[in-house]
Image: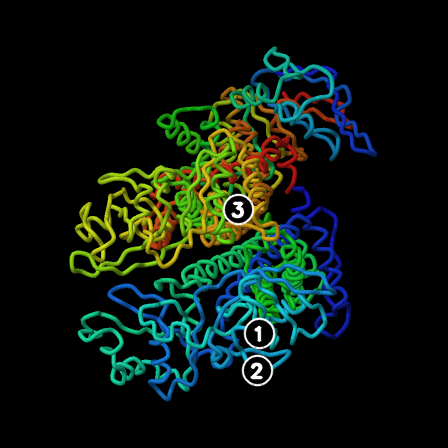
Amino acid sequence: MIKITDLEKIYRTEEVETIALNRMSLDIAEHEFAAIMGPSGCGKSTLLNILGMLDKPNSGSFLFNGIEVAKFSENQCSDLRKRNIGFVFQSFNLIDELTVFENVELPLVYNKVKAAHRKAIVEAALEKVQMMHRRNHFPSQLSGGQQQRVAVARAVVNSPRLILADEPTGNLDSRNGQEVMELLTELNEAGTTIVMVTHSEHDARYAHRIVRMLDGKTVLENKMF
Amino acid sequence: MKGNFVEKAGTASPSPFGRGSGRGFQLTPIVRNFLSVIRRFKMATTLNILGLSVAFAAFMVIMIQLDYDHSFDKFHTDYDKIFRMELSQNTSTQALICRPLAERFFESSPHILAGALTSSWLQPAPFHIEKDGVRILYEENSITVSPSFFDVFTFDFVEGVKGDYLSPSNVFIPLSLSRKLFGNESAVGKQLVHASWGNQTVMAVYRDFPANSIVDNDIYFAMQENENRQSWGNFNYYVYFRVDDPSNVPQLFENFKRNFDAQAAFGADFTWEDANVGLRFTALPDIHYVTDVGYDRTPKASRQTLLILFAIAIVIVMIAEINFTNFSTALTPMRIRNINTQKVLGARQGAMRFSLVLEAVLISLLSFLVATGLMMLFHRTSLARLVDADLSLTAHPLIVGGTAFIALLAGLLAGLYPAWYMTSFVPALVLKGNFGLSPKGKRLRNTLIGIQFVSSFALMIGVSFMYLQNRYMQHSPLGYDRDELIIANIGRIQQSRDAFINKLKAYSGVEDVTHGEVILSSSDQYMGWGRAYKEKHILFQCLPVDYTFLKVMGIEITEGRDFRREDALTRHGAYVFNETAKKKYDMEVGTTVDGQEEIIGFMPDVKFASFRTAVEPMAFYVRGSENWSDRSNCAYIKVKAGTDKRAAMSYIRDTLAEFDAEYTFDVKFFDEVLQRLYEKETSLGSLISLFSLIAIFISVTGVFGLVVFDSECRRKEVGIRKVLGASVTGIIVMFNKTYFRILLVCFVIAAPLAWYAVHNWLENFAYKTPIYWWVYLLAFVAVGIITACTVTFQNWRVATANPVKALKTE
């Protein structure tokens, strides 16, 4: 599903040049659950951002479903992204002014799903993460674990083929963290490809494969199964 | 620009708390803190100082103008004991009185301490003085008064004394004129040489009156001892008197009626009641405001206008204060982390509150200083002419001091709430959590923005109608041909009038020339003539003209005929009346007025006077051979269409110079006459427009600032939305929608308010511009466009930024 080859990402400021990705290559197959691990600053988040088409590589190739997207315009990326990719963040990133329902509904709005159809889809997603009873609450009224479950519901609501998770349990206690990991596993078992950045060896064990990075490169790949 | 609005990471400010000292706070760190805040929030500070200083300056200018009008004539000793006598008949009142009536009145009561008359003819009189054997020509306003004039009003004599002999040949002049004519030499004993009146000797010099007085700085000389002394029909004088106690004034008229033999004066069958005649007394300070008095030429102000200006002054300061408060609270989330870090490090709450309030007060006072600078700048521009009053700061210590006090209060007010609010959190909580915007603060800000939008709409609509009304008055059809018209005052060459006219007619660019005694549409009303018609007393305004007048001016005749040369050769002359007179007095062609002056025709109701007044009975009159006066002073020169009007104008001037080389003639395009007629409305309109624009400008500054702030605070939200698939356009539309919702609500509130105000203001005019719906639409579109531009411009960068960056900032 994803094939990156010789991907390079360099951040430049006036004084320093930081190489975030150093001619990195990686393949991720359809239905795979991959965990990316490595110390702070090794390029995990940069990789995830490029996979999510939120950032562009300086050079190299990025095939998404066989399509070269490295040179896509912002609008093309945006189009591809909103139909195919869901995001789960460490800090949940729910919009404070919107209710749980409205937060989950947002990707459907941007995918131009008709209002009449949206309700059922959102409710199904909330049901899946067991947050239906909180549909009219605001994020500030929820616990961290509940917020992350809403964020997961939002990530899956338009049935993406790929979910990118950036330390999804980083802000959660172990019990809530486990619930979220189990949710992701369920989604993966239902057919969604998942790429997860994590610091937790425990969480990484949910994945089929662990990609270990250092200084912008893959250093080791462990097959779990 | 935007980066400056938000606290820059890593520029921690020096802490405001006294290091280890037992005292609550030390000043130096507070000052240092203040300077660093200004540096950090450059844009907010700039917007604050800009808005506040413009507001304070506008406030001072308006207050100075209000003070000017409010203190009009109040510097006379006993100003509250001085009154003007007016004559009212039926529904109209006039300021002109006949001399014997005034003098009998003065004698009628011991409460009247002094009474004086001034001639209604204030005219620029040309004269010359001899200086080192050289004749220098001047032209200054001269007016005849009764010598008691100086007992009624308070004159401050610099040279000579009030008791000095004033006579037709002895004059009192103002100090400014003395300086102008004689420099630093003493003026007393100097001669003013008039071509027609002979020599006048300067007897005394008085200190000039301020501009806000009905007493002008003119050359005063005495009227002839017996001038119109027994002329009961000659209403030609303004009459003022001073009493011992204003509470006696209401009884003066009754008392006068009891002691005055009215039948001897006005005829055997005269009674005050039947004639419906009465005397009215207007207190000196009120003269500035009364507008229902005929022949009242004193400068006017309307209390309503002053009220509008006062309201605008308040609105301006309020809007600026709202901005100030808004910015202060808007910056709260950005500053709160810093403040709490200081708290954690041990800063005292009191010291920090003091520092925050002081910061606001300092900004406010700094703005006040900038405002005084702006005032001085304004003083030098041509805009200062819109204000009658002297704008120098030193002349108004009270207003300047008062504004400084308001600045202080504004600072306190804007500083207190955020100071308490920002320092009231438990530090640990805020340091850890992600402090967003409180919905309460957001509501408050939206309400305050709302007030600004409402004022902007209302002011914009009000100003538009003011402009439309002025335009309507200056550009509506008048019923006569006013294009290509030049007016020349030829009073000085009366004897050579025909020669002058013939010379002009010979010029190829001139189509025709006529003349009349007054200039059409130059005044609210003209000389009123009381005559008998069909055994009834009729009153109409009469404009004596040349027989060619109607033809040249393109005024049609609806019945009867136009004037002919022969009319001027008849003994008593002839009238053409307007439709209103015809209807009101049931007039017919061929009948006579006063049994001798023939009505030869009728014309439509041309707008001979201003649009403030409704058309009244009026006549053009061609004087017959037996006329008591021929003051056909105004030449109406019609220039051929397509001719260079400027060239024609200079030809006219050259021709006039051939008849009198010394005199500078008043020659002007007719448009200028109309401009002068509506000068009050125009300058008032400009004044109100100027200050409204300022109010709108400050509002926009406020909206701009908040939009910047809002978009900064919503960077993360925008990031999330973009990750979820929102387009840049979608984000921009979303931001605009928020503001348009507020805009719409405000418009719904402002529109009826504006309608009500405009409707009331238009009541001042007999002829009103329609209240167009599109003005409202225009105001909405204008404010909408300004807002949309601000919102779009400010949010463009946020909307196009890489969402990754926004999501990274926690």
Q: In the depicted view, which residue is nearer to us: B18 or A106?
A: B18
Whole-angstrom CA distance, mark 1 to mark 3, is 30 Å
Q: Earlier in the sequence, mark 2 or mark 3?
A: 2
**Could you tell me which secondary element the residue under label 2 belongs to?**
loop
Residue sitting farthest toward the bottom: B110
Position in image of residue B465 (x %, y %): 41, 46
Q: Chain of mark 3?
A: B
The C terminus of chain B - image quarter: top right
- Give neighbour class at mark 1: few <14, some 14-19, many 20+ (Cα, 10 Å): many
Whole-angstrom CA distance, mark 2 to mark 3, is 39 Å
Based on the displayed image, in which of its 4 quarters is residue B226 positioned?
Answer: bottom left
Residues at circles 1 and 3 in contact by the CB criterion of under 8 Å:
no
In the image, which disc is placed on residue B561?
none
Q: Residue at horizontal 51%, vertical 31%?
A: B508
Residues at circles 2 and 3 in contact by the CB criterion of under 8 Å:
no
Looking at numbered disc 2 in the image, what kind of residue is underneath it?
Asp
Q: Earlier in the sequence, mark 1 or mark 3?
A: 1
Q: In the depicted view, which residue is nearer to us: B210 or B173?
A: B173
Q: Residue at horizontal 38%, vertical 58%?
A: B629
Looking at numbered disc 3 in the image, what kind of residue is underneath it?
Val
In the image, which disc is placed on residue B172?
1
Q: Is residue B442 visible?
A: no
* A66 is higher (above) or lower (below) than A23: above
Q: Is residue B329 left or right of residue B574?
A: right
Q: Chain of mark 1?
A: B
The residue singled out by tag 3 in the image is B667
